[in-house]
Image (spheres, rainbow, N blue to C red):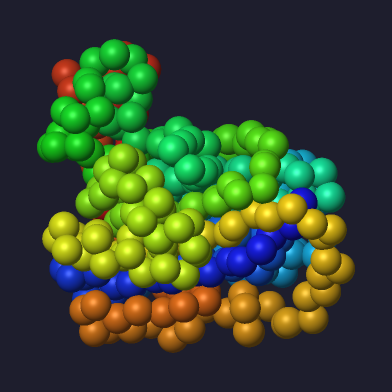
Amino acid sequence: MRIATAVGVTDTGRRRHRNEDAFVCAAPLFAVADGMGGAQAGEVASRLATAALGERVTALRGATELVEIIRTANARIFAHAAQDPSAAGMGTTVTVALVDEGAGTATIAHVGDSRAYRLAPGRLERLTSDHSLVAELVRAGRLTETEAAVHPHRSVITRVLGTEAVVEIDTTTVRLAPGDVLLLCSDGLTAMVRDERILALAEETAFAPQALADALIATANEAGGDDNITVVIASIEEGEPPVREHHTPPGQGEVAVPAPLDAVGGRRHGIGAGGRLPALLAIGGAVVLALLALAWGIVR
């Protein structure tokens, strides 16, 4: 088993003037981070997360190492916010896929509401569970997916990197098959494009990563482009795994985060930066489950 093709694309969308997303597309490691925080702090948070991952591309072997480096990223973001009053409340989601081509598996690590999917003809499988208020309500049977999509608190997320000294990280390992396609994305895609449409676009583009990435971003923008949109897509094929060497210094080349784009609709290929409008929101017990009552969430 091996990675056939991989591509990452980020787009500012139609309503944001700054892109605070970031991503890594450095096979066998792929990641999406969606930053939040005032005074460009969200951009800093997502870059700190992807930079930490980029530093360890060759050292990552499985879930243990993946969790360790995400915890390192969390500590760096938390420390930065503590030292800079203008960065108070900064944070970022992160969704990471580490492909073991020899074993034919992908380990997924996840915090927040960016997502990972596995696509194949006739099949779309969500590999992550959103850490968000509405997702908690859906899982508890209090909301349907349709109701969650229009809920007034749909932007509230309950877990991110950087807002607490310690963060809980979800992990799972899935077995891959030839023809599978891994899709990582920020919520700028999934808030605009439903799962069934994502699968339809994958089939219309014959699961070709670049064509699919372009189609997903175009469709999200056509639906309103309310947020930054980032996708990282990797296709899997039969064959012997290649010998991979990463000589790129952190912060350059395939794991570089380019300078921010201020123009609405700006796009980047490779590692990019994306955005959302952040604030802290107290979640009242009258609105949420008992387990979330009086807890603090984060609203974009």
Indicate left or right for 108 with 214 as reference.
right
Visible residue check, residue 87? no
Q: How many labels does the image show?
A: 0
The image shows residue 50 at horizontal and vertical percentages of 57, 65
Q: In this orientation, which residue lies closer to the viewer: 139 or 199?
A: 199
Up-down relation of residue 260 to residue 27 (above or below):
below
Q: In this orientation, which residue lies closer to the viewer: 70 or 164?
A: 70
Q: In this orientation, which residue lies closer to the viewer: 186 or 126?
A: 126
Indicate left or right for 272 with 138 as reference.
right
- The residue under the point 29% across, 13% down is 141
Visible residue check, residue 286? yes
Q: Residue 13 is drawn in which quadrant?
A: bottom left
- The residue under the point 24% across, 84% down is 263
Up-down relation of residue 288 to residue 157 (above or below):
above
The image shows residue 198 at horizontal and vertical percentages of 34, 49
- The residue under the point 38% across, 82% down is 260
The image shows residue 252 at horizontal and vertical percentages of 63, 84
- The residue under the point 52% across, 37% down is 127
Indicate left or right for 273 with 106 as reference.
left
Q: In this orientation, which residue lies closer to the viewer: 116 or 22?
A: 116
Up-down relation of residue 70 to residue 14 (above or below):
above
The image shows residue 67 at horizontal and vertical percentages of 68, 45
